[in-house]
Amino acid sequence: MLAAFAGVVAGGAAGALVWLIGWSDVLALEEVHVTGAGASVETDVLAAAAPPMGEPLVRIDTAAMADAVRGLPEVADVSVTRSWPRALTISVEPRSPAAVVSDGSSWWQVDSEGVLFGKGTEQPAGLPVLTAPTGDTVDEVAARAAGVAVLTGLPGELAELVVTVTAETEASVELTLDGGATVRWGTADQMENKSDVLLALLAQEATHYDVSAPAKPAIRP
């Protein structure tokens, strides 16, 4: 009898604990902390996450919140964790700009993956300019990624001679040199070989250099 009574009490206590954690407002969401994001991005993060204030912390779908925030162009990755007893922490890994791209009226920052973010009317300072399509198709993203890889992978002595880098497609990256000559670079593969070959070719004055196949380079007077 006593054992049965103890079992009832224990069961009641367990039920009360479940209710306390999962249904009462004792451990409900009251605060949301965002780390790793600037003020403007933080506003977008909170809007995308739409944290359910007042919801018991244990019942909040943190994975769904992270997926929603991950959809923001400025966010490379994100994690959402419970900070007991009444808070959530949204940890953001922002995209790192490698260059800027313009469509003629607007400017975007672009990262190494070719993702555009941070759209504005003014050219961002301190970043090289890449001429590339600004659409969001797979091919356009790949073109930007290739352009960024070439733009950021050129050795210093060659980078000093380059005025613009153009990437209409992933396989058609071109350079324009400060003397007006153009260089068909091709893909972003074999960066070191192509750089060495081009530096050697520059000893010959020409209007166009082709190092897209570095084993078989070509020049046009």
Image (cartoon, grey):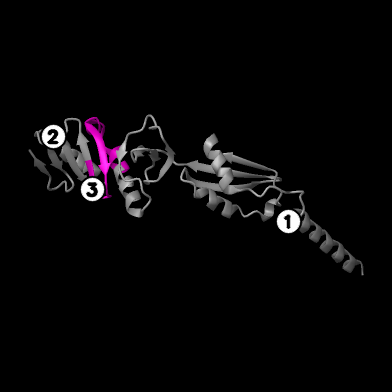
Q: Amino acid at mark 2?
A: Leu
In the foreground, 97 or 215: 97
Q: Which residues are magenta?
A: 148-174
Q: Which residue is mark 2?
A: 202
At a point 92% along the width and 70% down the height, the residue shown is 1
Badge 1 crowding class, 10 Å Cα cut-off, few under 14, some 14 to 19, many 20 or more, is some
Q: Amino acid at mark 1?
A: Gly
Q: How many marks?
A: 3
Residue 37 visible within the image: no
C-alpha distance separating marks 2 and 1 = 71 Å
In the displayed structure image, the side of residue 1 where residue 130 appears, left or right = left
- Based on the displayed image, in which of its 4 quarters is residue 160 positioned? top left
Badge 3 crowding class, 10 Å Cα cut-off, few under 14, some 14 to 19, many 20 or more, is some
C-alpha distance separating marks 2 and 3 = 20 Å
> Which mark is nearer the camera, 1 or 3?
3
Q: Which residue is mark 1?
A: 22
